[in-house]
Amino acid sequence: MLSRLTSTVGEYRHRMNFRLSILDFRLGVPMSKKVFGLALGAMLLALSFSADAQQPAKIPRIGLLSPFSPSATAGWHQAFRQGLRDLGWVEGKNISIEYRYAEGKSDRLPDLAADLVRLKVDIIVASVNTDALAAKNATRAIPIVVASAGDPVAIGLVESLARPGGNITGLSQISPELAGKRLELLKEIVPKLSRVAVLWNPKGTTSPLAWKEIQLPARELGVQLHSLEVQSPNEFEKAFQEATRARAGALAIMPDPLFAGNLKRIAELAAKSRLPSIFHLSEFVESGGLVAYGPDRSDQFRRAATYVDKILKGTKPADLPVEQPMKFEFVINLKTAKQIGLTIPPEVLFRATKVIK
């Protein structure tokens, strides 16, 4: 475009000089250099506007990073796109999205994050702690919005919830009372409950925090906790065998991408062991688990779209406080309850936001 513009200006200059020479010869009065300069400036301005008009408007590009599979995140990402549409951003029209899934293999996240950085996306949207940390390690320049982080301060994603600092902001799924609340629900569902097996990942970023938080509520409820440490999917069978040997009366699963990516397998093992189980994601209950209580993650992804909108309009991530959960889900699977021979008390059913029959 620049070469064509230069060529055109040169040609115009040559023609103007030729016409000026003719005027000088015919009229005997040379044209003012000032008049010539004005004419040439007008020509350049017109050509500049013409060149700009031919340039297509830049469409913002979002990098959507996830440690899970497309099927596991379909509902969350649909909620995110709906949130964008509500704000006037339509995928394929005035915004584009690059999807990168680790398929449950967290070791792939650094390469996937680096790929999005190479593509020079305008914003990276992460799901949870693991992919948010991978994105942070990949770039300190591209804004990062995390939809459902664990404790973003404790793991070093942000400096504080009110003042994130740096290039990361978003939403947190952590609320200090949630671990205790899930334990209370198990106690209501199984009134004589005295021992609970706790599935947690000591190498995770959120799981150890949840394991720590559940200790005090357990003492207050008079419930003994039995630790089941799991770091890979091939350890699930052994963990449930240990829960049976320990005579656990129920199972509490701590938040962790490893467990979120293996919901169906955990639900099957819990049912086989006849263990009433509780997790923080409604997808667990939809996969055959008994109970879920926690933040509505679809709502969090929908709210993440507002962060994207503000950043695209010029707000810096450091100036956007991290929000905590506002909407919660309490889901019960009555089919699973029947399968393990459990009757859910009516007062508990009444409080459920969704019941699967």
Image (cartoon, rainbow, N blue to C red):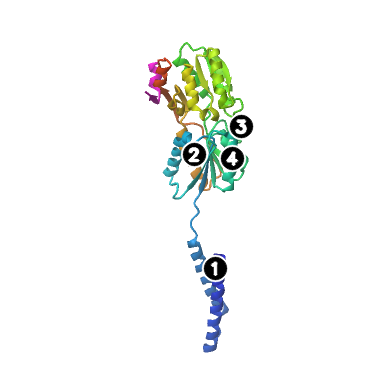
Asked whether 231 or 25 is in front, the reply is 231
Residue 155 is labelled as 3
Q: Is residue 261 visible?
A: yes
Which of pointers 3 and 2 lies earlier in the amino acid sequence?
3
Q: Is residue 111 magenta?
A: no
Q: From which residue to which does the magenta span run?
A: 345-357
Label 2, on which residue? 304
Which of pointers 4 and 3 lies earlier in the amino acid sequence?
4
What is the CA distance from the residue labelled 4 to the residue labelled 3? Answer: 14 Å
Q: Secondary structure at mark 3?
A: loop
Tell me which amino acid carries mark 4.
Ala
| Quadrant location of the C terminus in the rendered image | top left
Q: Position of residue 78 (x, y in %)?
A: 44, 39
Please give the name of the residue rendered at 39% of the width and 26% of the height, measured from the top-left corner. Answer: 354
Q: Position of residue 278 (x, y in %)?
A: 48, 22
Please give the name of the residue rendered at 56% of the width and 65% of the height, measured from the top-left corner. Answer: 2
Q: Is residue 140 left or right of residue 267?
A: right
Q: Kindly indicate whether the residue at mark 4 contacts the one at mark 2 (C-beta within 8 angstroms).
A: no
Which of pointers 2 and 1 lies earlier in the amino acid sequence?
1
| Quadrant location of the N terminus in the rendered image | bottom right
Please give the name of the residue rendered at 55% of the width and 26% of the height, measured from the top-left corner. Answer: 233
Q: Position of residue 79 (x, y in %)?
A: 44, 38
Q: Secondary structure at mark 4?
A: helix
Mark 2 vs mark 1: in front: 1
Q: Residue 18 falls in which quadrant of the image?
A: bottom right
Tell me which amino acid carries mark 1.
Arg
Tell me which amino acid carries mark 3.
Ile
Which of pointers 4 and 1 lies earlier in the amino acid sequence?
1
Q: Secondary structure at mark 1?
A: helix
Q: Position of residue 196 (x, y in %)?
A: 53, 16
Q: Kindly indicate whether the residue at mark 3 contacts the one at mark 4 (C-beta within 8 angstroms).
A: no
